[in-house]
Structures are given as C-alpha cells and as structure tokens.
Image (cartoon, grey):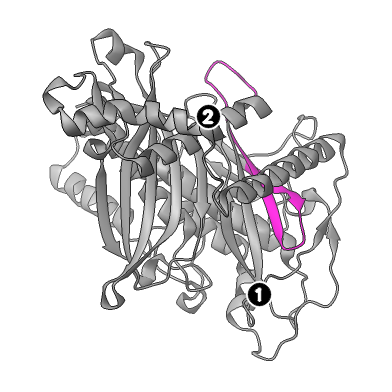
Amino acid sequence: MNRRFRSAIIAPLSSTRNCNLKGFWNSYKFMKRKLRDPFIRSFSSSGPDDEHSTRLDSSDSAIPVVSMLETSQPIDAGSSIRKPISLWPGMYHSPVTNALWEARSSIFERLTDFPTNAPPQSELITKSPSESRTTILYKFSSDFILREQYRNPWNEIRMGKLLEDLDALAGTISFKHCSDNDSTTRPLVLVTASVDKMVLKKPIQIDNDVKIVGAVTWVGRSSLEIQLEVTQSSSDLDSDSIALIANFTFVARDKITGKSAPVNKISPETENEKRVWEEAEERNKMRKQKRGLQFPMKEIEEKEALRLNELLAEGRVFCDMPALADRDSILIKDTCLQNAFFCQPQQRNIHGRIFGGFLMRRAFELAYSTAYTFAGSEPSFVEVDHVDFLRPVDVGNFLRLKSCVLFTELENPLHPLINIEVVAHVSQPEFRRSEVSNKFYFTFSVRPEAVQKGVKIRNVVPGNEEEAKRVIERMDAENQYHISK
C-alpha cells in the first residue's frame, strides 16, 4: 500500500484510541453513507461573509471572473444544492456537475420546459468573453470528501474525472454564451464536436486546491470554441501556475429541425482576448484543412507508399516468421484491450444523449489500463492528443471501447512515450450494424524511477496496411502540431 495513503488511513484511527469504539464505528458508517449517497451528503455553501471563501484579486493578471451565480465568487466544486428531481437529466453526477447544474439551473429550466411551438432566436447577440467566463474551485486542501472522490490508488488526482469535469464546464460556458435570456424562444442543442490537444504542463497534486477558469474564445456561424485553464498553486508558491490548457469545440443544432443553427457572436475586448481569438481562428482553419485531406482520403503517393512499406516490413516478419521477430518489438494487435457496456439513462445529458464527459472518462481509464499492462509499470499521463465526437451516443446504445498502443517514441530512453488510441463503436446487434462514435488519442510515459529500475518500453509495429495508415496519420498530426507551435 502506498505509504502516504496508508498513513492517511492510520492517522485518524490512532487518534480515536481514547474514544468509545462503538461511537467511532457508528461515525464511520455514517461517513460511508455520506460518501455513497449524494442525497444524504450535506453541501455547505460559501457565502460572501465566509472567512474561508475564496476571493479573486483584481490585481491578478488573469481576466476577472464572471460566474453563473450572479456573484464574483467562483463555483465551489464541493458545494451544491439539489434541485427537484424533475430538473435533473440523469442521476450520474460528479461533485462538479452537481455544482454546475445548480449554477445554470435557470437556463436548464428553460431547456426542459419550453413550448413545442416556441420560435427560434430571431436576433443574434454580441457578447464578450467575460460574459461567459466561469470558474470552478476544488478545495482539496480542506474538503476531505471532495478530495477522496478525486484520489486514485497512488494518492494522485484521477485525470479521467478531471477530463470529465472539463467537458461539463465547457458545456456550461457554451450554454451561457448561446442563451438569449428570452423564455419565449426555443433553446439550442449544443454538443461537443472535438477536443484539441491538452498537454499536462506540470503534475496536479491531490492535496492542493485546483481552479479551472474557462470562457468562449472564438465563434463561427454554428460552432464555438471554449478555452479552459487548470491552475494550481504549489506549496512553495503564492501564485497559481497553469497545469493544463484545453480547447473544446461545440456545435449548435436547432432543437426541432436538428439542423445547424447560428450562435451569438463574440467581441474580444482585451489584448489577451484578441490574441486568443486569433489562435482559435488558426486552429479552426487547420481543422478544415484536415477534414479536406481526410474526406475523401487522399491517395498515398510514392513517398507515402515507401513509409507504409517500412512500417509493415517488421510486421510481416512477426506474421510470417514469428520466431525471427525482434524481441524488443510487439504487434499492435497484441497490445489491445476492450470493454463494452450499455448506456444507461443515468448517464444522459439535458438532451437525452450520453454525457460526453462520461465517455471521455471511460476512454481515458481504458487507455490508462492499456498503457499500464503494456509497460508493466504505473504510467504517467502526458497529454490528450485529440478527441473526435463523430456521432451522438444515445441511452440504450451498446457501446464498445477498443484500445491499443498505436506507436511508441523511444528517442529519449529516460522519457519514452506511449501513444494510445481508443475507438468507441456504437453497436446494434439486432440490425447487425456498428458505427464509430468517438476517437480518442492519449499519450503516456513511465516514471523515471521505473526506467532506472530497468523498465523497458518496446517498439510497436503494425501488422497490416490499415494499422500502418492509422500510425502514419497520427504521426503526421503530431508533426503538424509541433511545426505549428
């Protein structure tokens, strides 16, 4: 057992030696019920007079925060009040999604109770990024219950849950921007289209407070980009430093017709907002260029055919003469893991579809397991390379997640990289049909101490042409990203 985690368990037990054992056991059982049952848990709201409430310094270089609660205070991830059950789309909630639903309850009530003949928004509104800016604060240093829900077996933060929360916060921000505050018009359906590369700039500690700040940074005709910054202050630093930046793209659909719908415009005000808008515009152009290259798929030219043959050369040895294959290499198909589950109504969002953050968390945890079994050592998260939401996932769908190590990067022996692909398939057995709904790409490494102890990462090779094409596509995407940087 991890020594720190073991001491965290033993310490509170040792302090009860002089207490009545029966009373302690009853308290322990009650605490377990609070952790297990969200209806029993009591949430404490931080008000403006609370001496422990977090205040934003106006002198901070960050843009002032405007939350959804009509107050300058950030949303406390550990504080929320249950609305009547009819206002909640499903029973699948993290502490952050609870707080976000509470924060945007006035908007959500419109989404669940609007006239079927309500007209669409007639006039677009121009908003500034500050009008959608929202902050979530995780008080890990003082909120034990919240900290335990985000702790992994190695006494670190569960990155999958954090990715899930990022998607939930991006959804709240998109609703805030697209709302026209008119109860007579029908609201838009906003869905996650893609997630750009997220690079973990520094490890996120479970014992220090974490803050996520996000806002709409770019708007097209029917799409918008939300940028989120995850910050955390180190124990030896007073100011927050950025641990991760994420860019989510959402698309808008008309709730009745299902067609693309225009969204409110955006007007950057500060120099920083204008710079971020220009960067988002460049990313949008790159996404369009990428779609143009993929659909239809460009023909492989002579140079590409050479790369393909080079990748397949070693794979053919594995398939045709396995006894002569390189012992330091492995076929992609031998690194695969998969799981399957039915999508339950408790996992749905306000539109009755499966919550995108839930899918992202499940994909991340499968990718983590794949990297773990491949490396034979606890992996460390490096980045989310890209996420595509190709089609919505509905309640009752049979979803299969397939994961594999697509390729490894071994140029730096002390910091090898493991690139994982996770593909989600929506299957309909009664119709003998299966479609790809999502593609996720993650990068992991192994800890330096594991490398020093002799852990060695093997080279991964494709066994057929289809796998080789996927490897080349991801390698090119990685190169394009580094060139653009």
Note whether 75 is above or below 300 in the view shown. below
Instruction: Specify the quadrant of the image occupied by residue 103.
Output: bottom right
Note whether 410 is above or below 261 in the view shown. above
Residue 229, position as x, y percentages in the image: 62, 37
Residue at x-position 34% and y-position 73%? 396
Residue 42, position as x, y percentages in the image: 42, 58
Residue 191, position as x, y percentages in the image: 58, 62
Q: Main secondary structure of the magenta part?
A: strand
Return the residue at label 2: 303
The answer to if 100 sits in the magenta stretch is no
Instruction: Specify the quadrant of the image occupied by residue 285.
Output: top right
Badge 2 crowding class, 10 Å Cα cut-off, few under 14, some 14 to 19, many 20 or more, is few
Choose the circle earlier in sequence order: 2 or 1: 1
- Relative placement, left or right, of 342 versus 267 is left
Note whether 24 is above or below 377 in the view shown. below
Q: Secondary structure at mark 1?
A: loop
Give the residue type at disc 2.
Lys
Residue 23, position as x, y percentages in the image: 19, 48
Return the residue at label 1: 259
Q: Which residues are magenta?
A: 213-239
> Residue 93 versus residue 177: which sits nearer the camera?
177
> Residue 61 versus residue 340: which sits nearer the camera?
340
Give the residue type at disc 1.
Lys
Give the CA distance from mark 2 to mark 1. 41 Å
The answer to if 217 sits in the magenta stretch is yes
In this rendering, does residue 247 appear at all? Answer: yes
